[in-house]
Amino acid sequence: MGENNAPDENRPSRRGKVSAVVLPICGLVAVLAGGLIAYLNRDFVGWFAYAPLSNQPFSVPGAAFITRGTQFGLALVVAGLLVLAFWAGYRLGRRGSTRP
């Protein structure tokens, strides 16, 4: 049994090979682009208040809000990392399922 199996039956399709390369590249590009966007939009937008009776501004050390550009960049990094994690899990699962 099994002598009739042609050796070409188990070869992955060209489409599968392309998606195996394109998906991690897209994830890596998303991580790099998101990191760059977050880095370039790192303007400090801190919280401060004016105390009129003391004539001094009040600032809390360490309390800072991030800009929308930084939020978008960080979200893009997270999305890219999720794509890479999905790809790695998929590849490990496919590799484990091909063993006899």
Image (cartoon, helix red, strand yellow):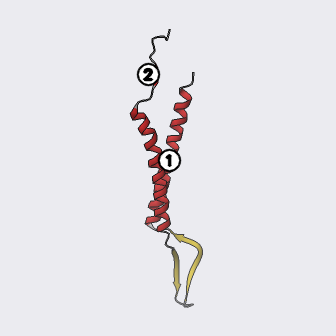
State the mark number for residue 29.
none
Q: Does 100 sit above or below residue 90? A: above
* CA separation in Å, label 1 and label 2: 34 Å
Which residue is outermost to the top? 1
Quadrant where the C terminus is found in the figure:
top right
Q: Quadrant of residue 4?
A: top left
Residue position marked by numbered label 1 in the rendering: 82
Residue position marked by numbered label 2 in the rendering: 8
Mark 1 / mark 2, whichever is N-terminal = 2
Q: Position of residue 90 (x, y in %)?
A: 51, 36
Which residue is outermost to the right? 61
Which residue is outermost to the left? 15
Task: Determine whether label 1 and label 2 are within 8 Å by CB.
Answer: no
Q: Nearer the viewer, residue 8 or 85?
A: 8
- Circle 1: element type: helix
Q: Position of residue 73 (x, y in %)?
A: 46, 60
Query: Residue type at mark 2?
Result: Asp
Q: Does 2 sit above or below residue 82? A: above
